[in-house]
Structure formats: structure tokens, C-alpha cells
Amino acid sequence: MSTVDDDPVAAPDWVGRAANQSRLAFGLAVTELAARDSSVVAVSADTLDLIGLRDLSDRFPERLIEVGIAEQNAMGIASGLATTGLRPFVCGYAPFITARSLEQLRNDVAYANQRVVIGAAASGISLGVAGGTHHALEDLALMRALPNMTVVVPADAHQAWHATLATEHLDGPVYIRLGGRVEEPAVTPVVASIRIGQADVLRDGSDVTVIACGALVAPALEAAADLSAQGIDARVVNMHTLKPLDRDPILAAAAETGGIVTAEEHHLTGGLGGAVAELLAREHPSRMRMVGMPDEFAVVGPTDRVRDRYGMSGRGIRAAVLDLLGRSEPLA
Amino acid sequence: MLSNREAKLQGLREAALRLRRNIWRALHAAGSGHMGGSLSAADLLAALYFHHLAIRPDQPDWPARDRFVLSKGHANAALAAVLAQSGFFDESLLDDFYGFESLLGMHPDIKAPGVEMSTGGLGHGLAVGIGMALGAQLQGRDFRTLVMLGDGELQEGSNWEAAMAAAHMGLANLTAIVDFNKIQQSGPVKAVLGLDPLADKWRAFGWEVREIDGHDIGAIVDAFDALPYAPDKPSLLIAHTVKGKGAGFAEDSHLWHVNAVTDEVYRNALDELGDAQ
Ligand SMILES: [Mg+2]
């Protein structure tokens, strides 16, 4: 079957411009929304290029609100804009737009339940070399703890585009976690849309289920392919929405497969693994392993190497599955 | 016979007196609360709601209404009282101040009619006000946005991010009012972390500043009528006030920033206001 993916000529313009970077796909999608809807505005904290808003700024200069390096102010202003009926998209670095402006996010946005979309670029350890000040490994825990908040972790640039467009139909605040200045492998098709709150089963399997989000979806698929060669049939679920959490595929995985491994580029506290464990503890206690960042600050280094050091890689996911199933690593 | 102006001011003074009684009514119902900063703001709020703001209490979400944000949210007794007195809801709701599932808690909740933003965490209101003022500007709408700040609140750095941005954006449709009562929770502002020179700080940040006696109704009305103070800058009104104004036992004392309101305190407060009914 031929799809748009196979035919670069037919691919929409945004695909090339996003260059497989979810942060750019977000900015392009906000620009697309701004072209459709005059109530769409972007609030930048000196993050115009980080998040692909240069084009919006050129085409709709009055709707690009630059507040400078002042995340608290960005968040409060976004809330005020939303009260007047505008649709603000706040753009920032994940570590700063969550933690620095957390009280504004909690009070002005979540508590006051305003329709504000937050695009958080450079999440996880996508800025590996930048060190702990610039790693965002607790943002999902912070956002997930806020009532009214929808939390989305696109698996790639394509999904970031569709997720951003889909916020058009959501009320209340939305957090969209985005990658850094590196290419992200495409794991979802260009034409796929996203149903926020409804996970995608990317690969069926009956022995074990890997539930992954964001940057760890591609490694989860890689691990599943490796495991398959060992005769282990792994289901892979892309849990792109952490909140509201899609219960059915998790409970089905617990009932139908031999255990669950979660995989995320986030602390093991309070993120995807926590969300899945909370659900299963209540409704279907299951054997689990969690792949993610242990309770320490990550070392400095190239992103892939730092991820792998803490098991956030295909290798690490495969090891977690084998451990869960009581199987040992194959001899090298 | 009184001139029109004098009659107007007399009416506002009476509204402010009634507002102070309603503040105490709410605080007495609650058993305690923030009387100091509620009473210091009472004359300003009376002039705002009964003279200055374009509002429709029977239509709280009227799109063209002026926006008022009480950034010093702990003075919610005063906001709730002035909203009730304006007709956004019944004055009897003040008897449910701090009540179980009440719309009226210690701090404003956007769910209550007439409340434009949930506030209480200090240093939030001015940024939200910028968003409202920008929202008006972007949509070609005429409504104005006013934000009331506490003096102690200005110690929060977020105010200065907002002050810088509002001036940079040239938001003439935005006004901030500082209820400068010189006292905060643990003592005089000067002793805790001084603000001087306050007017110069705001001027340096790009605001057009005026200062008045925040209990002189005539001066308050004139200051509101004169807005905006510059065609291309946000306006700042520094209102010099007395914490606990109108209750001698509570005036100018950090002990009455927040305190218990017994039956006796309530009786004394109403006695001082000259009417115990
Ligand atoms: Mg004070």
C-alpha cells in the first residue's frame, strides 16, 4: 500500500520544514492554527526559533507576544489573554516553562482553568551536554499533578504536529512535551491523526507489553524487534497522552500479556511508569518494570549516551523485559 | 445645597462606609481574616465599583466590561463585599464567607460572579492584567484593565517582570494601583524589605505615576478620571493608605493584618463605623 510517507513529493510542506523535530512541528502547527483562527496567539519567552515561530512572527507579528526571558510573566500573561477569549500557546524550554513558572501554571492556568497550551521544547535530556540545569526530567510529574491539565507527549514530529492541531478541540490547559535540537526518528505516519487520551498500539504481541512515550517509543519498537528474534512477542503501546490516561489498553495489556514495562525519558517518580502503576495497583495488580531516570541528576554528555547510561534505550528496554520475564540476556 | 460633585462624593463615602461594614460582616461570619488590607483598600474599591468601572452586575461576563484583578487576593473580604454591594450576588452570601463549598473563601475564585481571576499567591495579578490588556488591544476592544497590588506584594520579583513588560508593550489601557498601607504580615514594609523610592522605581520601569491619599474620595475619583496618565505608557496609582482604616484598634498595626474576629471585635468595629445595625 502506498502512503504519503512513501512519496516525498506528496508530503505536506510542514513535514520537510519540521525536519523530524517535534519542537519545530509544534511551532509550524501553531502557525497553521493562527492562519485558520484569528484568536490564536503565541507567547514566547525568547524562544522564537527554539520552537519554530519565526514564520508566525513574520506573518502575524501582532500575534507573537514576546515577553523575554521571563517564564512567570509569560504564563500569567497567557492566562490573562485566555480570559479575553484568545487562544494562547506559550512556548518555552521544558525545564523553565514548568519549574520556573510552576505557581503561575498552577494558579493562573490550571486552578483558573484557562485554555492555555504550553509547548515545552528541549524536554528530558535532549540537551544532554547542557547539564542538570537544562534537563527536564520531572516536568511530567509536575504537570500530571495539576488538576484540569491535559498532558501530551508526542512520539515524533508528525505526532507533535497532529497533537498541536488537536488542541483546537480541547478546553482547559494542555501541556505538550517536545524534543530538543536533534532529529527524532519518525515512528508515526505523516497522515496519522491523534486522538488525545487514546493510546496507539503500534505493535501487537502477547508475551509482554512495553508502554512507552515520547523519545522512548522508537527504542521500544527497536527492543520489540530484537526480542522477536529471541522468540519473545512484545506488544508496544505509544501512550502519547499521560493525562487523561487511557485505561483500556493498559488493563488489556495486564490481562492479556505476561507483564508490563514502561519506558519514558523522565524520572521514575511521577511520570508514565507512575501513572500506569497507580492504575494497575488499583484495578489489576501486575508485574512491572519501569525504564526511566533513577532518582539522581543525570550526567553531562551526548543525549543518546546519557539516555543509554540509565537504560533509556532499546538495549535498556530489552533488558527490562528479559528481567521481567525471568529470562537472561542472550550470550553476546 | 450640595454641588453635583459633592453629592457624588458623599454617595461614595456612604458606599465606602457600608463597604467597611460589609467587610466586617464577612470577616465576622468567617471568625477571622484579613481586615487590615481589606479596610485600607475600601475607599479605592468603592470608587472603582460605584464610580469608575464599566460593569454590569446582572451580566458578569459582559464582554465589554472593564477588568479588575485583585492581585493582593488576601483582601478578598473587601472584593466580595464590594461585589455583593454592586449586585453581582446577594449580600447575604457574605454570611457564608469561609463556609463549606462557599464561593467566597479567603482568596478570590474566578468561579464567583464578578471575580476576573483566582488570586492569592502574591505577584500574579499584574501579569494576568497584561494579558487582559493585550487581549483588548489585539481584538480592538475598549475595555480597560486595573490591577490592585499590595505593597508587601511588590517584594515578589514577578511584579517587576510584569512592570518591565507592560511598559515595553506601551499598554496605556492597563492601570496598577498600589494599596500602599506600609504594613505587611510581620511588620512595617520598611523593616521587612523596603520599597523606597517606590514611585521612582515604577517611573524607571517606564510607568506614568501618580500618588494620592487613598482615603480621600475626591482625590481617588480625580485620579481615576484622569486615566490614562500618558497616551503610550501604563499608569500607576500609588494610593497612600492606612492599614485597618476605620477601626482605630486595628489601624497601622501588623497584628491586624490577619486576626480573629470575635463578637466583641465585630461590635467594636461597627460602633466605630457609627452604626451597629
Ligand atoms: Mg501592606
Image (cartoon, coloured by chain):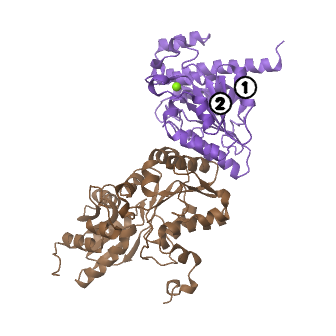
What residue appears at the point 30 percent right and 66 percent down from the top-left corner? A306
- Farthest-out residue, bottom: A1
Residue at disc 1, secondary structure:
helix
- Tell me the distance, in whole angstroms, between the alpha carbons under discs 2 and 1: 12 Å
Q: Give left or right: position of A323 versus B39.
A: left
* Dots 2, 1 in contact, CB < 8 A: no
What residue appears at the point 27 percent right and 57 percent down from the top-left corner? A281
Q: Give left or right: position of B246 versus A287.
A: right
Residue B57: horizontal and vertical position, in percent?
Answer: 68, 35
Disc 1 Cβ-to-ligand 1 distance below 8 Å: no
Q: Is residue A38 above or below residue B98?
A: below
**Residue highlighted by disc 1:** B221
Image quarter for residue A286? bottom left
Q: Residues within 10 Å of mark 2 (few under 14, many from 20)?
A: many
Quadrant including the C terminus of chain B: top right
Residue at disc 2, secondary structure:
strand
